[in-house]
Amino acid sequence: QYTVAKHLIDHPGDVMQLNMGTGKTRVILPMLVMHWSLKNRDKIIRINFLSALLNEAYSYFHQILTASMLGIRLYTIPFCRDIKLDENSMATMRNAIDCCREEGGVVLVAPEHRLSLELNCKELFYQDRCVA
């Protein structure tokens, strides 16, 4: 597990395939989060989890990373297509992301949340373009 984490630290962007039960969530990810959140305060760490695993991963990371001496803050931005974006909601999300960056926090996200937000933003962009 240390070898895998060390490789990913030394070679950012590399992809590794690991089998089930090899400590990806419980051992390797916390090591990577600790390294990158304490080293790169100017970047946001985003971890993608399947929505079925997001709450369990959040609870575990909260116990290990937030409720420890490290105090690494965790953020989630749940989003669905039914949410209508306006200036206030976008400013709130932007403030949360800025706080996360300033505090060296970590964003835990499910792919469908991220993609729903992305599609909603694209729709707003094209609506504004068509109206103008």
Image: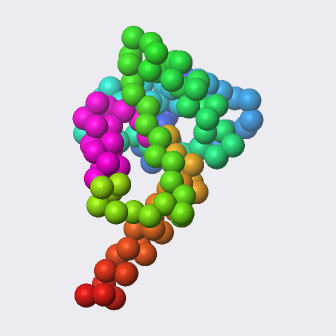
Residue at 56% of width from left, 31% of height from top?
A: 58
From this view, report whether residue 91 is shown above or below residue 52: below
Given residues 130 and 72, the one toward you in this image is 130
Residue at 39% of width from left, 28% of height from top?
A: 73
From this view, report whether residue 75 is shown above or below residue 2: below
Residue 98 lies, in percent from the top left, at: 27, 43
Residue 79 lies, in percent from the top left, at: 51, 54
* Residue 40 in view here: no
Given residues 89 and 12, the one toward you in this image is 89
Q: In which quarter of the image is residue 118?
A: bottom left
Q: Is residue 90 left or right of residue 112?
A: left
| Quadrant of the frame with the C terminus | bottom left
Residue 54 lies, in percent from the top left, at: 61, 39
Given residues 94 and 39, the one toward you in this image is 94
Q: In which quarter of the image is residue 74?
A: top left
| Quadrant of the frame with the N terminus | top right
Residue at 33% of width from left, 88% of height from top?
A: 130
Q: Is 60 contained in the magenta span? A: no
Residue 69 lies, in percent from the top left, at: 39, 11
Given residues 126 and 65, the one toward you in this image is 126
From this view, report whether residue 23 is shown above or below residue 69: below
Query: Magenta stretch?
Result: 91-107
Q: Is residue 5 left or right of residue 34?
A: right
